[in-house]
Amino acid sequence: MVVPSPTPRRTKKTRALGIPTIDLSLDSSNVSRLIVRACEEYGFFKVINHGVDKEVVTRLEEEAAHFFGKPAMEKQQAGPATPFGYGCKNIGCHGDTGELEYLLLHTNPLSVSERSKSISNDPSKFR
């Protein structure tokens, strides 16, 4: 999930015209091909027709915005990503430098429960 940074950034023209969108309602061979291409060309993609309720997605996006808006010291309590948790990497080398923050979670409810206390101000919302 990509969440806008609270820090204003300068925008530059890029050759990318948009984020690749993967429609999971397509047949699996097309989906697989599209995912591979998106990963090779962009490194990320947007998924549609995944069957997850819009309310769930909205709540997750709100919690993510709250988490990534916290000061660095608070976010670091949910890390390091070994392999799951919060991480932050410096990226870019040709004038396009910046930081990439990420939060990797395991689908195991116990794993998410352990991390939720350091991710959300109200862990009952993040589960």
Image: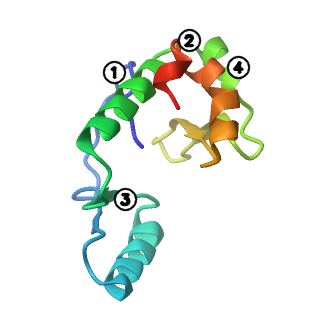
Q: Can you identify the residue that label 3 sits on?
A: 45
Q: Can you identify the residue that label 4 sits on?
A: 77
Amino acid type shown at disc 4? Gln
Amino acid type shown at disc 2? Pro
Q: Secondary structure at mark 3?
A: loop
**Which sits in the foreground, 71 or 108?**
108
Q: CA distance from mark 1 to mark 3?
A: 23 Å
- The image shows residue 80, relative to residue 23, as above or below, that is above
For marks 2 and 1 on the same chain, the one whose residue lies earlier in the sequence? 1
Q: Can you identify the residue that label 2 sits on?
A: 71
**Which sits in the foreground, 22 or 116?**
116
Q: Residue furthest bottom?
A: 29
Residues under numbered marks 2 and 1 in contact, where contact means CB atoms less than 8 Å apart: no
Q: Secondary structure at mark 1?
A: loop
Residues under numbered marks 1 and 3 in contact, where contact means CB atoms less than 8 Å apart: no
For marks 1 and 3 on the same chain, the one whose residue lies earlier in the sequence? 1
Amino acid type shown at disc 1? Pro
**Which sits in the foreground, 111 or 68?**
111
Picture coordinates of residue 67 (x, y %)?
A: 49, 21
Q: Secondary structure at mark 4?
A: helix
Location of the N terminus by quadrant is top left
Q: Can you identify the residue that label 1 sits on?
A: 8
